[in-house]
Amino acid sequence: MFKKVIIAEDLDAMNLGIQQVLKDLNIVNFQHSKFCDEAFLKIRAAINQNEPFDLLISDLSFKTDHRKATIANGDELVQKVRELQPDIKIIAYSVEDKNYRIKSLFDNAEVDAFVLKGLNSIEELKKAIHIISTSDQKFISPEVSSALKEKNNYEIDDIDILILKHLSLGTPQDDIIQILKDSGIKPKSKSAMEKRLSKLKDFFKANNTVHLVSITKDMGII
C-alpha cells in the first residue's frame, strides 16, 4: 500500500472525502494542495529531500483566482509530474466524462487510474488505490470505461495537425488550402477541406471549428 500521498483538489468537500478514503486504507502520510503549481512544487521538493510521494490524486479542473498559474489544470499537472517522477502512481479524479480527454490522460500522461466523481466514487477510489498499489493494472470507472475500449477508424495525421495549427492562428480556410496547394499537399479543394474538418469535429466531438481548436489545444496536440 502507498505510504506517502499528495492530493491536488481545490474543493474542500472533495478533499475531505479523499482524505477519509486514505485514512480508511490506513494511509496517514498525505498532503493537500488547492493549486496545481503548489502541488508540483511539493512533489519536486519531496524528490529533492529523498522522500518522494508514491501517489498523486488529482482533479482536472481548478478554479482560478488572483494568483498567476503556471500549471493551469490537472491535465498539465499530471503530465509534468509524470515527466518529473516517472515511477509515481497517478489517479485522475474528476467529473470529466469526455472519452477523448480521458483516453488522452492514459495515452499521453500515462495515468494509472481514472475515477469518475459521482455516486460510487468513494468505493471506486478505494478500489483504484488498491489495484494500482498491488499490481501494474490500470483502473477506470465503469461509467467511462468505453473511453479505452472505443476504437475510431479515423486517425489524426500531420496534415490534420498543420491545418489545426493554421486555424488556431486565425488563418482563413481558403488561405490554408492555398498553402497546402503550394506545398503539394491535399486537401486542395474547399469541399475536401470541409470533409476533413467534419471528420475531426466528429472525432473530438466538437460543436464547431472554434471548439475543435480549443479541444486540441487543451490536449496539447497543437
Image: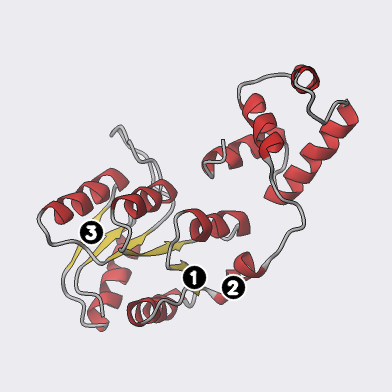
Closer to viewer: mark 1 or mark 3: 3
Q: Determine the secondary structure under disc 2.
A: helix
Disc 2 and disc 3: Cα gap in Å? 27 Å
Whole-percent x, y for residue 47 in the image: 17, 55
Residue visible at 40% across and 81% down in the picture: 131
Which quarter of the rendered picture does the N terminus lie within? bottom left
Quadrant of res 100? bottom right
Which element carries disc 3, helix, strand or loop? strand
Tally of numbered discs: 3
Counting other residues with Cα less than 10 Å from the Cα at mark 2, is it few (<14), some (14-19), or many (20 or more)? few
- Left or right: residue 91 compared with residue 12: right
Asked if the residues shown at circle 1 and circle 2 are in contact, with their CB atoms under 8 angstroms apart, the answer is: yes
User: Is residue 212 or residue 49 the one in the foreground?
Assistant: 49
Residue 46: % across, % down: 15, 56
Q: Which residue has dot 1 on it?
A: 118
Quadrant of the image containing the C terminus: top right
**Residue in the image at 79% along x and 45% along y:** 199
Q: Which residue matches tag 2?
A: 143
Query: In the rendered structure, which amino acid carries the disc numbered 1?
Result: Gly
Q: In which image quadrant can residue 59 be found?
A: bottom left
| Rendered image: mark on residue 109 | none
Instruction: Identify the residue shown where x is 40% and y is 75%.
Output: 125
Mark 1 secondary-structure assignment? loop
Q: CA–CA distance between discs 1 and 2?
A: 10 Å
Residue 83 rendering spot, x and y as whole percentages: 34, 50
Residue corresponding to mark 3: 32
Q: Earlier in the sequence, mark 1 or mark 2?
A: 1
Instruction: Give the answer, above or below, for where 88 lies relative to 33.
Output: below
The residue lying furthest to the front in this view is: 184
Amino acid at pointer 2: Glu
Mark closest to the chain's N terminus, 1 or 3: 3
Q: What residue is drawn where x is 77% and y is 57%? A: 153
